[in-house]
Image: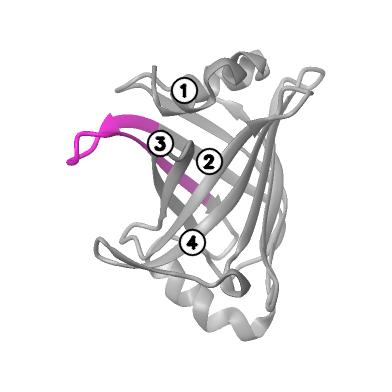
Amino acid sequence: MTIYTTLLGEKFQQLHPKLQHRYALPLGQRFFATGVMSQIINGGRWLYPFYCLASKANFLFPESGQEIPFSIANRCAINPDGEAEVAWERTFYFQNAERKFNAKMTVDLERKLVKDFLGDIPFFYSDLHFDVTKEGFLFITSGVQKVMFGKMGITLPDIFRGRVTVLEGYDDQRDVYTIHVSIYNAILGRVMMYAGEFEESVH
């Protein structure tokens, strides 16, 4: 068992079979898929300096657009701390730029959540809560968030947190995975939203 099957326990069997396949992720195996984001929208222009800085660490980015090709790769391995860790690499192929949104996830069984370290440095951390909808979709919401300085983190007050919601499903009629991600802040409004679909492929 790897981190998502361990975390969700019996609920894992309630996921759509294709999502069970996607999130089983045995150690050393890889999931790779390609698809199209029907829409990617970031926040206001005044956030542009922040997006540019974040893009240096392969976190957020300043581009928006429609019908943007993308790929996603996941692999589970044992990290230097001896924990099972899933690496996420999302790549968005804009007309004038290639942007990545990377992360590494481990599980905290005591608190029953996923620890999500965002970016390649990384400089941002978020608790993630995983659940399964009655339709068999995976529903993810964020909790405590921190700005990281090495292994030390400063917890962000609620008002400064990015409220993350993720809904991932599978469309049986079209044989595609579906994804909708929203990051929203109480002060800034929308920080980023993207929605699209993808298919597993050999890479």
- Quadrant including the N terminus: top left
Q: Which mark is residue 145?
A: 4
Q: Is residue 3 above or below residue 54?
A: above
Residue designated by label 2: 71
* Viewer-side residue, 193 vs 66: 193
**Kind of residue at badge 2:** Ser
State which region is magenta.
Answer: 75-91
The x, y position of residue 99, in whole percent, is 49, 59
Q: Is residue 88 magenta?
A: yes
- Quote the CA–CA distance across marks 1 and 4: 35 Å
Element on which disc 2 rests: strand
Circle 1 or circle 3, nearest the eye: 3
Q: Is residue 72 above or below residue 184?
A: above
- Quote the CA–CA distance across marks 2 and 3: 33 Å
Residue designated by label 1: 202
**Residue drawn at (23%, 38%), measured in percent from left and top?**
79
**Kind of residue at badge 1:** Val
Residue 104, located in which quarter of the rendered image?
top left
Whichever of callouts 2 and 3 sits on the residue coming sooner in the sequence is: 2
